[in-house]
Amino acid sequence: MSYTIGGPPRLFGLVPCAGSGLRAGTDGPKQYAPLAGRPLVAHTLEVWAGLLEVEATLVVLAPDDDRFEQMVPQWQGPRCWSARVGGLTRAESVAAGLAELAVRGVQPHDWVLVHDAARGLLQPQWVRRLMSACGDDEVGGLLALPVADTLKQAGDEEPARVDATVPRAGKWAAQTPQMFRLGLLRAALAAAGPQVTDESSAVEALGHRPRLVSGDPENFKLTWPGDFALAERLLATRMAPSS
Ligand code: C5P
């Protein structure tokens, strides 16, 4: 890939896809569980392949993944990258993916949009909303939703009981994509360590305040067994011919 040092920042996608997905109760990693006849991650990657303003998207796979190419045969061509560099946590997988992007010529000032493979109902217009909100931003930002429900803090016992009610005012639930410059994100994740659960929290820990950009309730992460049935119902209504 050719690039110009100091040229305008470009956009790249990074999709961590190296989790085991134990909470989903699926037979094997949840990113390969069937959703409307295709593996979950195939839905996710179809969106990234279609976003032509993104130069290339890197899928981060587990080192022992032996089925990605068979499960997602459409993922090929100069804008569709993959690397078996996943780690034990999501943060380690993302950090390894960022190192791989640097090896492939992505510059510190280029933007990277990190998106969970497990958010398979992503729509391109939500990604474009994030890009246009953050393209001129000093820090970057993320898709997120203001919390509508009252939040409860549970204790340790089973069955669960409420320890406290957490004030919901000003609280947002973080989604992905999360959009930051490669250089800032690499430094932030290196400082934050392997346990952070999103990119924004690592960037916040350096003292920055990322932009919150409205996401969508349908952009949920398929996590629990019932999520697949819900996602299939939503996809069925999206694909239904209008009458
Ligand atoms: O486990 P969780 O649902 O938070 O995972 C979010 C995303 O991070 C998923 O797409 C999953 O495949 C990915 N992941 C990863 N490497 C890990 C753990 C999770 O790439 N070690």
Image: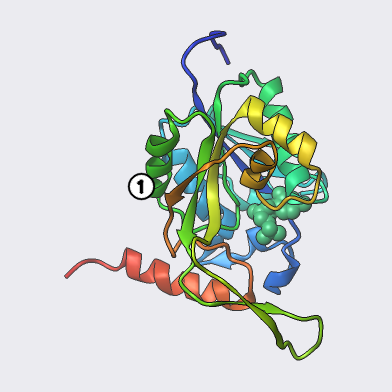
Residue 210 in the image: x percent, y percent?
Answer: 54, 41
Q: Residue at x 41, y 32 (%)?
A: 52
Question: Exactly how many numbered labels are in the figure?
Answer: 1
The quadrant of the image that shows the C terminus is bottom left
Q: Residue at x 49, y 75 (%)?
A: 149
Location of residue 76 with respect to 70 vertically, above or below: above
Check disc 1 and report the residue beneath it: 125
Left or right of 171? Residue 66 is right
Q: Quadrant of ligand 1?
A: bottom right
Which residue is most to the bottom?
159
Location of residue 97 with respect to 201 vertically, above or below: above
Between 228 and 64, the residue placed more toward the observer is: 228
Q: Residue at x 81, y 46 (%)?
A: 194
Between 20 and 165, the residue placed more toward the observer is: 165
Residue 78 in the image: x percent, y percent?
Answer: 54, 27
Observer able to see residue 85: no
Residue 220 in the image: x percent, y percent?
Answer: 52, 63
Q: Residue at x 55, y 23 (%)?
A: 110
Location of residue 46 with respect to 223 vertically, above or below: above
Q: Quadrant of residue 199?
A: top right
On whether ligand 1 comes within 8 Å of the CB at mark 1, the answer is no
Left or right of 171? Residue 199 is right
Left or right of 187? Residue 145 is left
Between 119 and 62, the residue placed more toward the observer is: 119
Q: Quadrant of residue 205?
A: top right
Location of residue 67 with respect to 235 vertically, above or below: above
Residue 114 in the image: x percent, y percent?
Answer: 59, 42
Observer able to see residue 234: yes
The quadrant of the image that shows the N terminus is top right
- Determine the secondary structure under disc 1: helix
